[in-house]
Image (cartoon, rainbow, N blue to C red):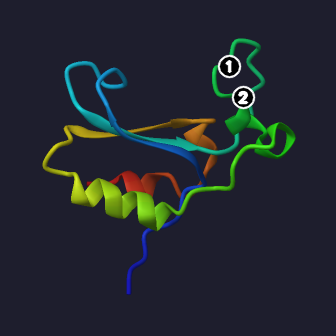
Amino acid sequence: MNRTPVLPLGGFLPQSLVDWPGHIAAVMYTSGCNFRCPYCHNPELVLPDEFGSTPLLSFDEVLARITRNRNLLGGVVVTGGEPTIHQSLPEPCAP
């Protein structure tokens, strides 16, 4: 059985009208970041343990929700944190 690699998700927005202009998109927020930008608007995703953020979300549950709503969505935005620090990133993003 091929299992999709799990991304550590710290947040999920089922539908957004602003994260991909002109499209309805689901937004997955990965947890963890190797940058320390002073203007970061998601600090709880950068260092989740230090900010007391909620536990990670189940990647499988988020994927199931996106799959159920796929007819309403133009795509999925993956943001963070910093998604590119996760070795598992490319595979779940492949079509």
| Quadrant containing the C terminus in the rendered view | bottom left
Instruction: Determine which of the numbered discs, if any, sits on residue 40 in the image.
Output: 1
Around disc 2, counting alpha carbons within 10 Å, would you say few (fewer than 14), some (14 to 19), or many (20 or more)?
many
Q: Residue at x 31, y 25 (%)?
A: 20
Mark-to-mark CA distance, 1 and 2: 6 Å
Q: Is residue 20 above or below residue 72?
A: above
Identify the amino acid type marked 2. Pro
Q: Is residue 58 above or below residue 29?
A: below
Is 11 in front, or is 7?
Answer: 11
For this view, does 67 lie left or right of residue 49?
Answer: left
Q: Residue at x 57, y 41 (%)?
A: 84
Instruction: Determine which of the numbered discs, if any, sits on residue 25 in the image.
Output: none
Q: Considering the numbered disc 2 on the image, is that residue within a helix, a strand or a loop?
A: helix
**Where residue 28 appears, x then y in whole percent?**
46, 43
Q: Is residue 73 above or below residue 36?
A: below
For this view, does 40 lie left or right of residue 49?
Answer: left
Identify the amino acid type marked 1. Cys
Farthest residue toward the right? 50
Around disc 1, counting alpha carbons within 10 Å, would you say few (fewer than 14), some (14 to 19), or many (20 or more)?
few
Dots 1, 2 in contact, CB < 8 A: yes
Is 82 in front, or is 59?
Answer: 59
Q: Residue at x 79, y 39 (%)?
A: 47
**Residue 87 figure quarter:** bottom right
Q: Considering the numbered disc 1 on the image, is that residue within a helix, a strand or a loop?
A: loop
**Residue 2 figure quarter:** bottom left
Q: Is residue 6 above or below residue 21?
A: below
**Where residue 12 appears, x then y in whole percent?**
47, 44
Residue at mark 2 = 43
Q: Residue at x 13, y 49 (%)?
A: 71
Farthest residue toward the left? 71
For this view, does 20 lie left or right of residue 71?
Answer: right
